[in-house]
Amino acid sequence: MNNVIIIGSGCAGLTAAIYTGRANLKPMVIDGHEPGGQLAITTMVENFPGFPDGILGPDLIDNMRKQAQRFGAEFKSGAITDVDLSKRPFKITAGNETYETRALIVASGATARLLGLESERKLIGYGVSTCATCDGYFFRGKEIAVVGGGDSAMEEANFLSRFASRVYLVHRRNEFRASKIMIDRTRANEKIQFLTPVVVEEISDVSKGGVENMTLRNAETNQASTLPVSGIFIAIGHLPNTKVFRGKLDMDENGYLITRYGSQTKIPGVFAAGDVQDHHYKQAVTAAGSGCMAAIDAEKFLEMRADV
Ligand code: NAP
């Protein structure tokens, strides 16, 4: 029987592990299918407080993991396949293993949707990014592209126009999912040029380890073209990792967990932290902050409910 199980080992999960570890709760962390979360696939992180020269995402997450281990956190690999939250202790199944726990912190994150190109996967962190707030600063004075036609793409294109000399907004249709106000604001921005209806076919140059251009195909004329850019921001949405909680925890229409009074879900003893319950801020530092909140809430819950 565990005091607390933490699902997910990104910034939120590891911060929850550090806090519950220091509270002597001997947390168990189940890694999930993306150990380390989104920081593990980032390169330089310059906006996490405390690192004036920046720190590599994988190093930051590795430090957090060591810090959690120092305070007694135990790590298990494996993705969660089922949860039984109908009664306490909760039962958490990862493949062939089932664990029991008095409290649960869900920090399973959200996965940025990608286009699915091999070159895109290879160049993530090397010119291809899914986070304008994190990486925009690296593209000062450069020409870059944002892919997508929703509010995120519009917001990121506007944000990136503060740094880049030109931003191409690349979208596969002539119609946009984004709200009118966001489209109007983006169209009024002189630094942003719309390219539609175009599909991204390839990102080059993997052999040089960086982004030099993208191959686009016009969806109406079928004509291919090459667009020279130094960076590409993929803004085609995120998928919260909440499949196993469907019908068990409250979610919004996009599948994000709904929390109240800090990190509480509708089930007493189940808490949520990080991007799995945040589609707005999505930052390492806000995920860490909410991991801390969930740990404190879980600790208080266990203190008050010694019977559990
Ligand atoms: P979204 O609204 O789902 O838009 C995703 C966009 O990516 C769509 O334009 C879609 O194209 C495109 N896309 C999806 N898969 C693609 C693929 N494989 N290849 C190329 N393009 C692809 O996602 P979002 O923009 O992240 O927004 C999510 C939610 O957050 C929305 O409710 C949005 O309003 C909200 N949000 C609000 C704000 C704000 O109000 N300031 C800011 C950000 C987000 P199609 O349209 O052709 O399917």
Image (tube, helix red, strand yellow):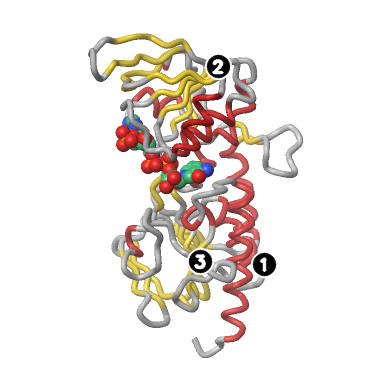
Occupied quadrant, residue 85: bottom left
Q: Amino acid at mark 2?
A: Arg
Q: Earlier in the sequence, mark 1 or mark 2?
A: 1
Distance in Å between CA atoms under marks 1 and 2? 48 Å
Q: Amino acid at mark 1?
A: Arg
Q: Amino acid at mark 3?
A: Thr
Q: In terms of secondary structure, where does tag 3 sit?
A: loop
Q: Mark 3 near ligand 1 (CB under 8 Å)? A: no
Query: What residue is at 54 percent from the left and 47 percent from the top?
Result: 282
Rendering coords of residue 144 (x, y %): 51, 19
Report if residue 74 is visible in the image: yes
Residue marked by disc 2: 166
Circle nearer the viewer, 1 or 2 = 2
Q: Earlier in the sequence, mark 3 or mark 2?
A: 2
Residue marked by disc 1: 22
Query: What residue is at 36 percent from the left and 60 percent from the top?
Result: 80
Q: Mark 1 near ligand 1 (CB under 8 Å)? A: no
User: How many neighbours does mark 1 have within 10 angstroms: few (below 14), some (14-19), or many (20 or more)?
Assistant: some
Circle nearer the viewer, 1 or 3 = 3
User: How many neighbours does mark 2 have within 10 angstroms: few (below 14), some (14-19), or many (20 or more)?
Assistant: many
Report if residue 115 is visible in the image: no
Q: In terms of secondary structure, where does tag 2 sit?
A: strand
Q: In terms of secondary structure, where does tag 1 sit?
A: helix
Distance in Å between CA atoms under marks 3 and 2? 39 Å
Relative height, residue 233 to residue 266 (above, below): above
Distance in Å between CA atoms under marks 1 and 3? 24 Å
| Contact flag, marks 1 and 3 (Cβ < 8 Å) | no
In the figure, is residue 258 to the left or right of 159?
Answer: left
Numbered badge on residue 305: none
Residue marked by disc 3: 259
Rendering coords of residue 73 (x, y %): 57, 63
